[in-house]
Image: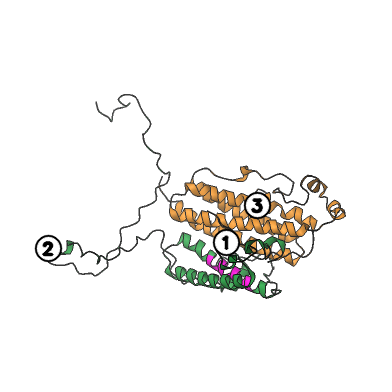
Chain colours: A orange, B green
């Protein structure tokens, strides 16, 4: 089961509004290599892991990804909180505002809604874990793109931190992959 | 009829019974015997059941791979938390960007930072232990960080309200869970 702890995994305190940055960061909320996709991918794959250590790692990383979803959503929310209609128009967010108001919505940078087709799962631990290694690398690359775009320390620090988590998760999945790849069928 | 002949008696059937897991995980080895322990010379004695209540607890079977033998190369909790990894060997910074912690604005933020960093350190060691459950050094480290987290969390909750639903801070009116700010709303 999951229980809520009333804090972020890493502090997010954005003081400066930046609606264009919302449009970029939102892909790590609802995009193909985003945190929501990662959480569902790992929590969904854990049922077919062949041993308890694999089940543990996918549960624990999948759970952490839910905390990352919350961090990314917090960044997006704080970047646009209190925006005026003029600011919304200037950032080209009329469509979002017209349909969703000031709510967040899990989409990618092109406005494509989140889809569970992003969840890789083929019921083969070796294939699934290598999928996860690729997913962590793609998420790391996307965070680097976002870091390149960021010009505010309040956004930069959580992005750097989230990027480093992708590096760490890749290393953890690689350890599991190395062990699983030699299992006999 | 020879069952090894081509075809099957009564027609070929798929195997009956539950589907087997695709990959076979090696069974954990039996609990180890103590090396050098003398075998009792008198036949039969060695197999006598121990007196009730005196049975030694069986040591848990070792599962999972042997952990790396070198000493765990970890950052201190606050540095690891800031960098986003506890493991020096895995840390890969991006370009020349520096991880910088904003100085906590007040006592609340300072105490929250303590909760965050110990929880983070314990969690990162936990992920490592998922892969290497036999690493006693990591288990000791994990427990140190959990202790740090519990202390920091209790101290925070006493002053600033509940972080989790079993907190001691939830006995008063109004229900403390609903006050004290929410993480995304800038209150924490």
Report the magenta residues as a range. Answer: B111-122
- On the picture, is B178 further left or further right than B131? right
Q: CA distance from mark 2 to mark 3?
A: 67 Å
Q: Chain of mark 2?
A: B
Contact check, label 3 and label 1, Cβ < 8 Å: no
Q: Which mark is residue B43?
A: 2
Question: Which residue is painted at 73% across and 56% down in the image?
Answer: A76
Which of the image's four quarters has the N terminus of chain B? Answer: top left
Tell me whether marks 2 and 3 sit on the same chain: no
Question: Which residue is painted at 51% across and 69% down in the image?
Answer: B146
- At numbered mark 2, what does the secondary structure look like: helix, strand or loop? loop
Residue A164 vertical position relative to residue A51 in the rendered view, above or below: below
Q: Most extreme residue toward the top, as rendered? A: B10
Q: Tag 3: Cα neighbours inside 10 Å, few (<14), some, or many (≥20)?
A: many
Q: Most extreme residue toward the left, as rendered? A: B42
Residue A169: quarter of image: bottom right
Contact check, label 1 and label 2, Cβ < 8 Å: no
- At numbered mark 1, what does the secondary structure look like: helix, strand or loop? loop
Per the image, the residue denoted by label 1 is B165
The residue lying toward the viewer, choosing from B174 and B99, is: B174
Residue A20: quarter of image: bottom right
Question: Which residue is painted at 63% across and 62% down in the image?
Answer: B175
Residue B44: quarter of image: bottom left
Which of the image's four quarters has the C terminus of chain B? Answer: bottom right
* Residue A49 visible, this orientation: yes
Per the image, the residue denoted by label 3 is A34
């Amino acid at each position: 089961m999951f229980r809520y702890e009333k804090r972020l995994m890493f502090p997010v305190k954005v003081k400066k509004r930046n609606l264009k940055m919302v449009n970029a960061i939102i892909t790590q909320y609802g995009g193909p290599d985003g945190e929501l996709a990662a959480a569902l991918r790992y929590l969904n794959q854990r049922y077919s892991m062949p041993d308890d250590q694999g089940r543990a790692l996918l549960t624990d990383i999948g759970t952490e990804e839910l905390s990352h979803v919350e961090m990314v959503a917090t960044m997006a929310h704080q970047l646009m909180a209190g925006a005026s209609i003029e600011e919304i128009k200037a950032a080209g967010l009329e469509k979002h505002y017209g349909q969703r108001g000031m709510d967040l919505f899990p989409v990618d940078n092109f406005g494509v809604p989140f889809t569970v087709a992003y969840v890789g799962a083929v019921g083969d631990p070796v294939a699934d874990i290598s999928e996860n290694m690729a997913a962590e690398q793609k998420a790391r690359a996307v965070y680097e793109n976002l870091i390149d775009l960021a010009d505010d320390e309040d956004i930069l620090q959580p992005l750097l931190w989230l990027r480093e988590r992708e590096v760490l998760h890749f290393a953890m999945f690689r350890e599991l992959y190395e062990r699983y790849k030699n299992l006999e069928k | 009829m020879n069952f090894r002949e081509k075809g099957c008696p009564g027609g070929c059937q798929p195997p009956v019974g539950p589907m087997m897991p695709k990959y076979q995980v090696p069974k954990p080895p039996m609990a180890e015997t103590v090396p050098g322990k003398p075998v009792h010379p008198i036949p039969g004695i060695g197999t006598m059941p121990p007196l009730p209540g005196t049975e030694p607890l069986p040591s848990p079977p070792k599962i999972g791979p042997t952990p790396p033998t070198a000493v765990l190369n970890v950052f201190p909790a606050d540095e690891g938390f800031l960098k986003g990894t506890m493991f020096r060997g895995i840390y890969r910074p991006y370009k020349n960007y520096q991880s910088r912690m904003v100085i906590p604005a007040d006592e609340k933020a300072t105490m929250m930072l303590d909760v965050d960093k110990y929880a983070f350190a314990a969690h990162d060691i936990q992920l490592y232990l998922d892969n290497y459950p036999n690493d006693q050094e990591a288990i000791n480290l994990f427990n140190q960080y959990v202790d740090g987290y519990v202390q920091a969390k209790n101290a925070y909750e006493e002053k600033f309200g509940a972080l989790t639903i079993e907190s001691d801070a939830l006995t008063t009116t109004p229900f403390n869970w609903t006050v004290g700010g929410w993480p995304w709303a800038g209150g924490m």
